[in-house]
Image (cartoon, rainbow, N blue to C red):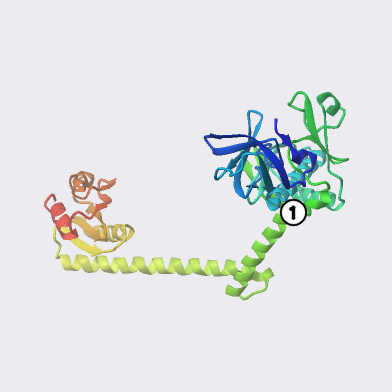
Amino acid sequence: MTRKLYYDDVYTMDFDSKVIKTDEDERGLYVVLEETAFYPTGGGQPHDEGTLDDVEVFDVEEVDDEVRHYIKEVLSTKGKVHGKVNHERRFDHMQQHCGQHIISAVFDDQFDIPTTSFHLGKDTVTIDLDTGKLSDETLEKVEEQVNQIIRSNYSVETKWMSVEEAGEYPLRKPLAVEGDVRLVIIPEIDYNGCGGTHPHSTGEVMAAKFLGWTKNKNQVRLEFVCGNRVLQKLGQKHQVLTEMKRIVPKPEQQLVGEVGELIHASKEKDKKIAELEEQLLHYEAEEILSASNRQSVIQRVFKDRSIKTLQSLGKAIIESAPEAYVVLISEQEKQLQFVLARGEDIDRNMNEVAKQVMPLIEGKGGGKPNFVQGGGKRLMDGQSFAGRIHNLL
């Protein structure tokens, strides 16, 4: 088995080791080393990344008791290699994972809410909590206590021991392993079986910030960030606020209200525009009716009119022409769209008419017996398509 240097010293990022195996599986080319500082995916924590002799290590997995380092290309050396773990990624994972231990401990100890799962994502971290909801008051209290523990700079210890020895500690949950187990211990705060990487003290977590929660089946999924990710999130939000203040020149405290008023005003304008467009369509419908001289088939072909406009126009015409058919076509660059309708004095199913003409444009459509809409490819011009429909009416 590969010796895992991250258990000897979690801050070891550079190391030399011997290649004992090179092979390939469904993930790609990999090497197995005599000893490694690369942490493989496990326990909710993602794998380390880095290089072996300047060759990129893009994945690390433990398979059949082997720590497999997946690499982009074949190593030029067959014996000793120099490994270099991406320090920023490793330390970030150490901060997030340790922060999760503290957060889960406070929820469990202070509010009797256990954690059921943990996921360390690229941007945020989530835990599933065995409760139906979280109040703002609870979140505020937990976040305050978590950050107090971080600032108090408790030591974070790791110890290997037998399951029997581990049972003498106030474990947060029963161990599901046999043989030796690794305990992560934050004295007075948390005692947990864990194989992940953690800093030597809670102070290195720096800070924790809750981002919100959502329902997840019968539980709650809490999203948060720790350490440098708190600063990153603050920087992102500050950039957004700076851009918002450039667009809306108001103090930060007034931005929400000002943007809310702008959105409300915009919606009111959109509503007014929609009402005016509807009025224009009714005027257009009256003009079409006036020009039709009460023909039995009222037919028009337009350029680039939307199907929604055709529908509104068709309904407006039919309301005033109970004895007529209406055929409206919109020619677009690569397609034809249409509306077929009949007045209430006509007893005919327009779906049957549509089914006869849709194959001409490889189209689809449907609707009620008195009003059908659809569209298809522009395999003929709009006037020709309208003419084919006219012949069926």
Q: Is residue 222 visible?
A: no
Q: Quadrant of residue 387?
A: bottom left
Q: Residue at x 21, y 55 (%)?
A: 322
Q: Is residue 13 left or right of residue 343?
A: right
Q: Amino acid at mark 1?
A: Gly
Q: Vertically, is 165 above or below 227?
A: above
Residue 175, percent from left and from top: 76, 28
Quarter of the figure that contains the N terminus: top right
Q: Residue at x 68, y 59 (%)?
A: 232
Q: Vertically, is 93 above or below 280?
A: above
The residue that label 1 is drawn on is 227
Residue 213, percent from left and from top: 66, 47
Q: Quadrant of residue 23?
A: top right
Residue 91, percent from left and from top: 73, 50
Q: Vertically, is 119 above or below 248?
A: above
In the displayed orientation, state which residue is furthest to the left. 391
Seen from the viewer's position, the closer of residues 192 and 70 is 70
Seen from the viewer's position, the closer of residues 290 and 36 is 36
| Number of other residues with Cα within 10 Å of mark 1, as a class: few under 14, some 14 to 19, many 20 or more | many
Q: Vertically, is 250 above or below 341?
A: below
Q: Is residue 330 visible?
A: yes
Q: Is residue 273 left or right of residue 11?
A: left
Q: Quadrant of residue 113?
A: top right
Q: Residue at x 75, y 36 (%)?
A: 194
Residue 10, percent from left and from top: 77, 44
Count of all numbered marks drawn on residues in the image: 1
In the displayed orientation, state which residue is furthest to the bottom. 249
Q: Secondary structure at mark 1?
A: loop
